[in-house]
Image (tube, rainbow, N blue to C red):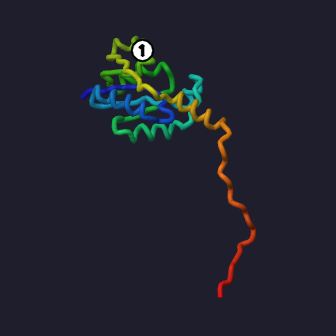
Amino acid sequence: MSTVLTYGTFDLFHFGHVRLLRRLAGLGTKLVVGCSTDEFNMIKGKKVVVPYAQRREILLSCRYVSDVFPENTWEQKRDDIIREKADIFGMGHDWTGKFDDLSDIVEVVYLPRTEGVSTTELKHSVRFMHSQNAPTVAQPARSDRVAVSASG
């Protein structure tokens, strides 16, 4: 049995996340995810939309993920690798070279990200759509009286 370990925020879970998790899971028999906590994301200067507990629940519902634990610091990775008995440490290619120092205890791989989607792009799109003067839905007129008709 080989264990793959990865990390991420996984905010606004999308098909790019699914594809990365599927590819990572294909490298071993068990995929364990360190999901960045809300507090750690604040330290990193990232604002999340979906709270940690809900992101963890979403990840656990993904068939490619065996377990999820909180990522609280940059420094915890070495201890996590040892605790989880990870054989492979995998990340998206945008992190290439950043975790090579872990290669003394685990195989480090960087996989291509899915083209055409990212959480950052989704957040920008939502902000843009929200900033437009989209028509609002007309609200029905309120009446304090109820009309009753008598039929005879």
Residue lying at 59% horizontally and 27% vertically, measured from the top left = 42
Q: Which residue is mark 1?
A: 96
Which residue occupies the extreme left position in the image?
1
Answer with left or right where residue 144 lies relative to residue 114. right
* x and y percentages locating residue 128 in the rendered image: 62, 33
Q: Residues within 10 Å of mark 1 (few under 14, many from 20)?
A: some
Q: Nearer the viewer, residue 66 or 72?
A: 66
Answer with left or right where residue 28 lies relative to residue 101. left
Determine the image quadrant of residue 28: top left
Q: How many marks?
A: 1
> Does dot 1 land on a helix, a strand or a loop?
loop
Which residue occupies the extreme bottom position in the image?
152
Amino acid type at circle 1 is Thr
Residue lying at 44% horizontally and 17% vertically, measured from the top left = 95
Answer with left or right where residue 152 lies relative to residue 60. right
Residue lying at 39% horizontally and 41% vertically, measured from the top left = 61
Q: Quadrant of the N terminus?
A: top left
Q: Nearer the viewer, residue 149 or 4?
A: 149
Determine the image quadrant of residue 39: top right
In the image, residue 10 above or below residue 137? above
Which residue occupies the extreme right position in the image?
144
In the image, residue 150 above or below residue 46? below
Q: Nearer the viewer, residue 92 or 66?
A: 92
* x and y percentages locating residue 130 in the rendered image: 63, 37
* x and y percentages locating residue 85 in the rendered image: 32, 25
Q: Quadrant of the C terminus?
A: bottom right
